[in-house]
Image: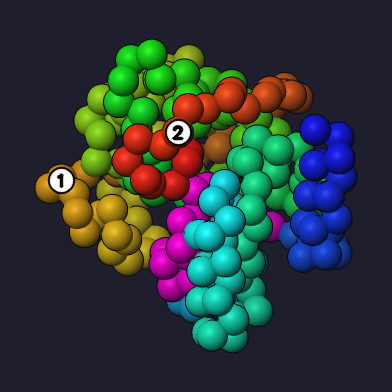
Amino acid sequence: MAARRAELRAKIGAIFPAPQAIVWEIGCGHGHFLERYAAEFPQRLCLGVDLASERITRALRKSERGKLLNCHFIRADALEFLHALPKGVTLQEIWVLFPDPWPKKRHHKNRILQSDFFAALASWAPTGARLYFRTDSIDYFKAVEALLPSLITWQVAEAGEPWPLEHETVFQARAESYQSLILVRTPHRAKSAEITAPEVPPLEDSRSPA
């Protein structure tokens, strides 16, 4: 783990040589959404992570073809990425779009949006940062909603706050319906959190492993 984190720190350090506020997509897949986002908001530095090398390779090709100097992709586990972030890098926006819902009850522990992960995110997100979550799994959505009353560092955005960018992803196009949630980082101080990603079984529906 120490070697992986050292290598990851080196890669991230090459992208962020100075303190930066970034837009982070967890489970970026082939980069369809983040590439479009980076093109729409060229002043924002965007970075996507995914566990699948093939997805990251294709995502990098997209950003290179589009000559998007503000769009980057790294193969990484989300938690290890967080713990490898240099000081001064903050998460201004976090995007979690159609993550694997891990529908079987015994696999629910592998869902990334859980209390410990929200606590870890809060350590790198300043007051007012946004987290955008969208899923076609009602069960997953309700599970996240059920967590919210216990989260002091995150709260639901005011009703009517717009979704910053509507760009249909592959999974969104396939979904019969979906639910969206915008969370806002509160002023409550975050406790430092060091948590380890669980050992996960093979993906069940081939979507981004988040």
Answer with the quarter of the image where residue 101 lies: top left
Indicate whether 119 appears above or below 7.
above
Q: Would you say residue 43 sits in the magenta stretch?
A: no
- Disc 1 from disc 2: Cα separation: 25 Å
Q: Is residue 95 left or right of residue 117?
A: left
> What residue is shown at x 70% (from left), y 44% (from top)?
81
Return the x and y of residue 203 as percentages of the image width and height. 41, 37
Residue depicted at 47% across the width and 64% down the height? 31
- Whether residue 195 appears in this view of the structure is yes
Residue at the location (47% across, 41% down)?
A: 209
User: Where residue 130 sits in the image (x, y, percent)?
Assistant: 51, 46
Q: Reading the chain from its start, which is encountered first: label 1 or label 2? A: 1
The kind of residue tagged 2 is Pro
**Which residue, given by chain and number where applicable, does mark 2 sit on?**
202
Find numbered disc 1 in the image and state the secondary structure of the residue it sits on.
Answer: loop
Q: Which residues are magenta?
A: 21-36
Rendering coords of residue 69 (x, y %): 65, 79
- Residue in the picture at 59% in, 86% down: 67
- Kind of residue sitting beneath label 1: Ser
Q: Secondary structure at mark 2?
A: loop
